[in-house]
Image (cartoon, rainbow, N blue to C red):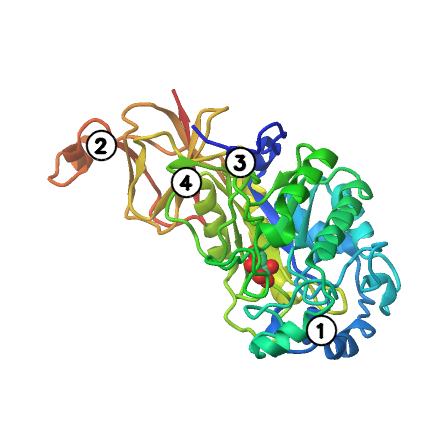
C-alpha cells in the first residue's frame, strides 16, 4: 500500500489522486537569473552582493516576447498535465505583484504581473497550477545571512554577525506567510505548492547563521496556514518538518525503485533538467535528447512516480529552440503513447520484463504496457504473466502482435520454455517501428 506520509495531526492532506494519475508536469524556472544565463544560482556562485545583482538585472528585466499562451501550448502538446513555476527563487525576485515587496516584476521594465497571465494561459489548456516558492531568500533584508549558501558565504563569522545586526528572522518568516497567503488566495485554486529548501545545521539547528530548517522558516506555522487556505493542495517535502508533505521530490537522479520512507512506498516526483541548470543557460551544451527524456518519463511511471521536467525561459520571455525541440519530440511520442503513462503505475508484483524494457500498468483497464528501450531479436519475454494475455498490440498503430512461441522455436534449448509456464512470449517484427520507444499493449484476462 502506498503511504501518503503521516500528515500532521488534525490537518487535512493534499489530494494526490489527480497527481498520480497525471504523471507528467512542467517545471518552469524563470527569474532575473535568466539574464545572467549561466545558472539560477549565479548570485551564490559568483558572490554577487544584493545591490550589484539588483543593478545588473532588476531594472533591465524586460521579457518583451513573453507570451504564456505559447508556453502553455508547448506544455500541453508535450502531454504535460500540470506545471510548477518559480513564483520566487532563491534570488528573492517575485513574478507576481506582491503587496509585501518592491522586488517584483511590476517594478521592472516588464511593468506588470507576469504570474497571473501564465496561470490563466495554462488553465486554459487544462493544465493544473503549481507554485514553487523559495524558502531561501538572498535578497530579503530580514533573512539571517548564513555561511553555507548565498552571496555572502565565505565572509568571516564576525563580518556575517555584523551584517546580521538588525535582521530578524521572525519577520522574514512572517513575510513568507504573507506571500504564501497571496499565492493561495489571489490566483484561484492552486494544485501544487513546492517549497524549496531546508539545510539546517545538524548540531545547531537553531543557529541560522549556520543553516536553516523548520525553525528558521517556522515551518509548522507555515504549513498550518497552507492547510487552512488550501486544504488539499499537494505539498512537497522540503519544509524540514515530519509529516508536513505529500510528495517526495528526488532531484537530478532517477530512483532505482519506488521511493520509500521508513520502508513504505510514498507518492513521488522526480524533477529533472534538460542539461543541468534550471534557469536559462546559454552555454550549457550537453542537453538530453527527447528520446532520453521520454525514457525518463516511462522510467518514473514504471516505478510509480511522476516526472516534473524543467524549462528555463530566456530573459526575453521565450522557450528557446533547444527546449521547444525536446518538448515537441516528447509530444510526438505522447500523442500515440500517453495511454501507457496517464493512470498507470508499476506492474503487478511478480511480473518482470525481459531485458531493456520497462513495464507500466493501468489497474482500471487491466492493461499492461511493455516499453521496449532496445529492439530485441524477434521475441520479447515477460515473466510472471503465464497465459494471462488475452490480446497484444502495438500501441502506436493498434496492430496485432502474436503471443506464444511456435513449436520449432520452443523446442530449442535456451528458449522461453526453459523458464517454464510463467513466461509470456510476444513475437515482434524484425525491425523496430518508427517511434522513439515502441510500446506493446497487453490486454490481460
Ligand atoms: C534546488 C536548487 C534549485 C532548484 C531546485 C529544483 O534545490 O536550489 O535551484 O530550483 O532544486 O528542485
* Above or below for 265 versus 165: above
Q: Of the numbered discs in the image, which one, if any, rests on residue 339?
A: 3
Neighbours of disc 3 within 10 Å: few (<14), some (14-19), many (20+): some
Quarter of the image where ligand 1 sits: bottom right
Check contact, mark 1 vs mark 4: CB within 8 A. no
Residue drawn at 79 percent across, 78 percent down: 55
The answer to which of marks 4 and 2 sits earlier in the sequence is: 4
The answer to which of marks 4 and 3 sits earlier in the sequence is: 4
Return the x and y of residue 133 as percentages of the image width and height: 68, 53
Query: Depth-wise, is mark 2 or mark 3 nearer the camera?
Result: 3
Measured Cα–Cα span from mark 4 to mark 2: 42 Å
Query: Depth-wise, is mark 1 or mark 3 nearer the camera?
Result: 1
The answer to which of marks 1 and 4 sits earlier in the sequence is: 1
Return the x and y of residue 169 as percentages of the image width and height: 69, 58
Measured Cα–Cα span from mark 1 to mark 3: 39 Å
* Above or below for 86 versus 166: above
Tell me the SS state at disc 2.
Answer: loop
Which picture quadrant has residue 70? bottom right
Reading the image, the residue beneath label 4 is 260
Check contact, mark 1 vs mark 3: CB within 8 A. no
Query: Depth-wise, is mark 2 or mark 1 nearer the camera?
Result: 1
- The N terminus lies in quadrant: top left
The answer to which of marks 2 and 1 sits earlier in the sequence is: 1
Reading the image, the residue beneath label 2 is 406
Outermost left residue: 413
Residue drawn at 74 percent across, 36 percent down: 229
Amino acid at each position: 500500500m502506498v503511504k501518503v506520509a503521516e500528515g500532521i495531526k488534525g490537518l487535512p492532506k493534499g489530494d494526490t489522486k489527480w497527481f498520480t494519475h497525471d504523471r507528467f508536469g512542467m517545471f518552469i524556472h524563470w527569474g532575473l537569473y535568466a539574464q545572467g544565463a549561466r545558472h539560477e544560482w549565479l548570485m551564490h556562485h559568483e558572490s554577487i552582493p544584493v545591490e550589484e545583482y539588483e543593478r545588473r538585472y532588476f531594472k533591465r528585466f524586460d521579457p518583451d516576447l513573453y507570451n504564456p499562451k505559447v508556453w502553455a501550448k508547448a506544455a500541453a502538446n508535450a502531454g504535460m498535465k500540470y506545471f510548477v513555476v518559480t513564483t520566487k527563487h532563491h534570488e528573492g525576485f517575485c513574478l507576481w505583484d506582491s503587496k509585501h515587496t518592491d522586488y517584483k516584476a511590476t517594478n521592472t521594465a516588464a511593468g506588470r504581473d507576469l504570474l497571473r497571465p501564465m496561470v490563466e494561459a495554462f488553465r486554459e489548456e487544462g493544465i493544473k497550477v503549481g507554485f514553487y516558492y523559495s524558502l531561501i531568500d538572498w535578497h530579503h533584508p530580514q533573512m539571517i545571512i548564513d555561511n553555507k549558501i548565498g552571496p555572502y558565504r565565505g565572509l568571516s563569522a564576525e563580518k556575517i554577525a555584523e551584517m546580521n545586526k538588525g535582521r530578524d528572522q521572525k519577520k522574514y518568516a512572517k513575510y513568507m506567510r504573507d506571500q504564501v497567503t497571496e499565492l493561495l488566495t489571489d490566483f484561484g485554486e492552486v494544485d501544487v505548492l513546492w517549497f524549496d529548501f531546508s539545510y539546517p545545521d545538524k548540531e545547531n539547528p537553531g543557529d541560522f547563521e549556520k543553516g536553516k530548517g523548520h525553525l528558521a522558516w517556522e515551518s509548522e506555522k507555515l504549513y498550518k496556514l497552507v492547510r487552512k487556505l488550501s486544504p488539499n493542495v499537494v505539498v512537497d517535502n522540503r519544509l524540514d518538518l515530519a509529516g508536513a508533505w505529500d510528495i517526495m521530490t528526488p532531484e537530478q537522479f532517477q530512483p532505482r525503485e519506488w521511493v520509500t520512507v521508513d520502508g513504505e512506498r510514498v507518492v513521488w516526483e522526480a524533477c529533472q533538467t534538460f542539461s543541468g541548470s534550471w534557469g536559462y543557460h546559454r552555454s550549457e551544451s550537453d542537453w538530453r535528447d527527447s528520446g532520453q527524456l521520454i525514457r525518463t518519463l516511462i522510467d518514473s511511471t514504471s516505478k510509480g512516480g511522476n516526472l516534473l521536467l524543467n524549462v528555463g525561459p530566456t530573459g526575453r520571455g521565450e522557450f528557446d529552440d533547444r527546449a521547444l525541440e525536446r518538448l515537441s519530440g516528447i509530444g510526438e511520442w505522447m500523442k500515440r503513447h500517453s495511454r501507457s503513462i496517464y493512470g498507470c503505475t508499476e506492474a503487478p508484483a511478480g511480473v518482470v520484463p525481459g531485458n531493456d524494457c520497462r513495464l507500466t500498468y493501468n489497474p482500471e483497464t487491466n492493461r499492461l504496457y511493455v516499453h521496449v528501450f532496445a529492439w530485441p531479436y524477434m521475441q520479447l519475454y515477460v515473466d510472471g504473466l503465464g497465459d494471462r494475455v488475452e490480446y497484444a498490440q502495438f500501441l502506436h498503430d493498434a496492430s496485432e502482435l502474436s503471443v506464444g512461441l511456435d513449436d520449432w522455436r520452443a523446442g530449442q534449448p535456451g528458449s522461453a520454455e526453459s523458464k517454464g509456464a510463467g513466461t509470456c512470449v510476444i513475437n515482434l517484427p524484425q525491425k523496430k517501428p518508427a517511434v522513439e520507444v515502441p510500446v506493446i499493449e497487453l490486454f490481460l484476462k
